[in-house]
Image: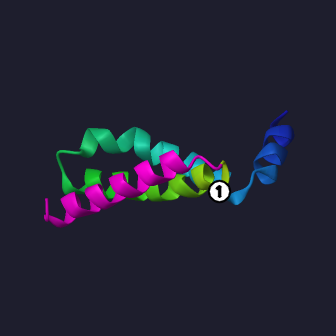
Amino acid sequence: MRTKYKKQLKELHFSDKLALMATGILLVAPYLLSYKAGFILMAIGLGMLTPQVYRAKQYNLVLLNAVSFVGYVLQATGVL
């Protein structure tokens, strides 16, 4: 059964693998938002999630991710 799971992971598109990693980052990041690292992790997670959403042609979520990414980067750099 374990080899079947590994085979399924190998068949995933690169954007899907990025999305899996992004999900892990986005699960942790909200708990760190009181620190600068939380905003950086949120920006990284959203950036990694965007290719999968774009590939799925969900352009409203692409725009939402882009705007949120900019907001988190500005927050992390101290502009906001």
Residue 14 in the image, given as x and y percentages of width and height: 69, 59
Give the left or right position of residue 8, taking residue 17 as reference.
right
Residue at x 66% of width, y 54% of height: 55
Name the foreground residue: 60 vs 37: 60
Q: Which residues are magenta?
A: 57-80
Give the left or right position of residue 5, taking residue 75 as reference.
right
Using the image, determine if residue 29 lies above or below residue 37.
Answer: above
Residue at x 81% of width, y 44% of height: 8
Residue ID for mark 1: 15
Residue 26 in the image, given as x and y percentages of width and height: 42, 44
Name the magenta segment's main secondary structure.
helix
Callout 1 amino acid: Ser
Residue 61 in the image, given as x and y percentages of width and height: 49, 46
> Which residue is the extreme one toward the top?
1
Residue at x 53% of width, y 55% of height: 50
In the rendered image, which quarter contains the N terminus? top right
Name the foreground residue: 41 vs 80: 80
User: Does the magenta run of residues contain 60?
Assistant: yes
Res 45 visible = no
Residue 18 in the image, given as x and y percentages of width and height: 59, 55
Give the left or right position of residue 78, taking residue 28 as reference.
left
Using the image, determine if residue 50 lies above or below residue 26.
Answer: below
Res 79 visible = yes
> Which residue is the extreme one toward the front?
60
User: Does the magenta run of residues contain 46?
Assistant: no
Residue at x 45% of width, y 53% of height: 63
Q: Secondary structure at mark 1?
A: helix
